[in-house]
Amino acid sequence: MRSILATLIRASLAASALSVCACSSAGTPGAAKAPGTDQTLITRADLDKVNATNLYDAVQSLRGNWLRPRAADSFEKPSVIQVYQDNVRIGGVTELRAIPPRIVVSVRWYDPIQATARWGVDHGAGAIFVVTAGR
């Protein structure tokens, strides 16, 4: 009985080790993303690749899903995606139309949980954080 149990434990450990190795290899779903593929960040280099007259159009081109709330959290007063420019809350995503892409250093997306943890309530739809050269 003891040898059967030991064999089962060894087989289970071997299977676990094999699955960990398989998931960590390149090109598989569990693999780490290559540098520069952070889907929560738009860099200056990314902005240089698009021809946009305002930041809203640039974000729409690069990460359009950032501009749409995932789901309504309230029928009476649904949350809106908040926009911050250099640590100052400037409003919703339409405010991105007033920002020229040439002055932007980076843009970062915060999901609702991260945004609420960082800035408090009223961030149930997430936040977009813009860093400009004038900072």
Image: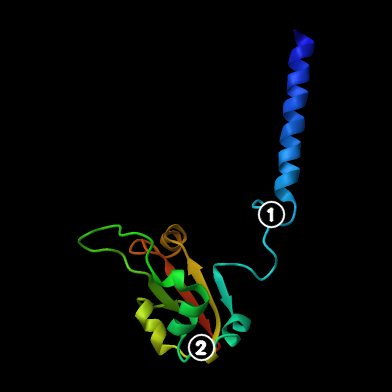
The residue identified by callout 2 is: 101
Residue name at image x 50 percent, y 73 percent = 63
* Spatial separation of the CA atoms under disc 2 and disc 1: 32 Å
In front here: 54 or 131?
Answer: 54
30 or 118, nearer to the observer: 30
Residue 31 as seen in the image, left or right of residue 131: right
Residue 69, compared with residue 6, is above or below; it is below
State the residue at coordinates (57%, 84%). 47
- Please, what secondary structure does the residue beneath circle 1 have? loop
Q: Whole-percent x and y of residue 11?
A: 76, 26
- Please say if 64 is above or below 132: above
Residue at 56% in and 67% down: 39
In percent of width and height, residue 9 lies at 74, 22
Task: Indicate the position of residue 43 as horizontal and vertical percent values.
Answer: 59, 78
Above or below residue 110? Residue 61 is: below
Image quadrant containing the N terminus: top right
Residue type marked 1:
Ala
Disc 2 or 1, which lies upstream in sequence? 1
- Callout 2: helix, strand or loop? helix
Q: Which residue is mark 1?
A: 31
Q: Amino acid at mark 2?
A: Pro
Q: Are marks 2 and 1 in contact (CB under 8 Å)?
A: no
Q: Which mark is residue 21?
A: none
Looking at the image, the residue that sits furthest to the front is: 27
